[in-house]
Image (cartoon, grey):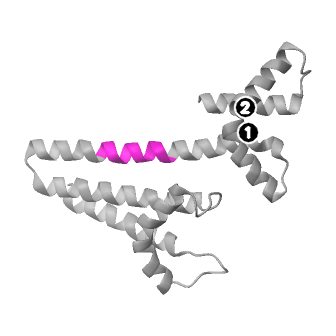
Amino acid sequence: MVVVILMALRLIFNYLDPNPFGSVGRFSFKLKKFTDRIVHPPAMFLARLGINTKIAPLVTILVFCIFGYFTLEFVVVVLGTIDGVISSVTEGNAVRLVGHLLVGFLGVYILFIWMRIIFSWFLSYTNRLMRFLMRVTDPLLEPFRRMIPPVAMFDISPIIVLFILRFLQMAVAGVLLR
């Protein structure tokens, strides 16, 4: 939330362009200097596309919301799996233990594929996070890429893999966790 508030203030000050010698102008300058480190990558991305870089704080908010969403989803999947594993161990139910582990693994893998799809739109393939996501998801995506041709230059194999993995996750949950 702090980043969102700072970026909203920066966006407002970008369009207000306050007097640099007044108190608001000095605050605006300090805010810009403080937030330049996180606004610079989206601004460079926008500049390469020929888009006005004044909206870079808005793009930064969007990027932080996406990262926040994926982080929260990851935490929910991992904590849900841990909770299920602990309850299965205390009950002594090995079938439910395997079910929780499989559902958790599939949930994390589905999340990694979604992250790869979304982040590939604005992250370079030389980025460490993208390399990690590619290294993790390629073993499953590559065979499907070879089987499913691109549709109008779009690779739809990740979508097919996501449907299959979600179906497997529901099947495992329906069979092993009931």
Q: With 1 as the anchor, is 161 left or right in this view?
A: left
Residue 84 circle label: none
Please determine whether, in this image, residue 95 is positioned above or below residue 32. Answer: below
State the residue lying farthest toward the top: 23
Taking the magenta stretch, the answer to whether it contains residue 45 is: no
Q: Residues within 10 Å of mark 1 (few under 14, many from 20)?
A: many
Give whichever of 34, 7 is nearer the camera: 34
Q: Is residue 41 left or right of residue 88?
A: right
Residue 128 percent location from the top left of the image: 52, 56
To which residue does mark 1 refer? 57
Q: Position of residue 160 (x, y in %)?
A: 47, 73
The C terminus - image quarter: bottom left
Q: Nearer the viewer, residue 175 or 23?
A: 23
Give SS at disc 1: helix
Image coords of residue 9 (percent x, y): 74, 27
Exactly how many numbered labels are in the figure?
Answer: 2
Q: Quadrant of residue 95?
A: bottom left
Range covered by the magenta-colored residues: 70-80
**Whole-percent x, y for residue 115 in the image:** 51, 57
Q: In terms of secondary structure, where does tag 2 sit?
A: helix
Q: Amino acid at mark 1?
A: Pro
Residue corresponding to mark 2: 8
The amino acid marked with disc number 2 is Ala
Residue at (10% x, 41% y) in the render: 90
Residue 155 figure quarter = bottom right
Q: What residue lies at 51% left-to-right and 83% top-to-bottom?
A: 148
Circles 2 and 1 in contact, beta carbons < 8 Å: yes
78 w.r.t. 172: above or below = above
Q: Main secondary structure of the magenta part?
A: helix
Instruction: Residue at 80%, 25% (x, y): give it.
Output: 29
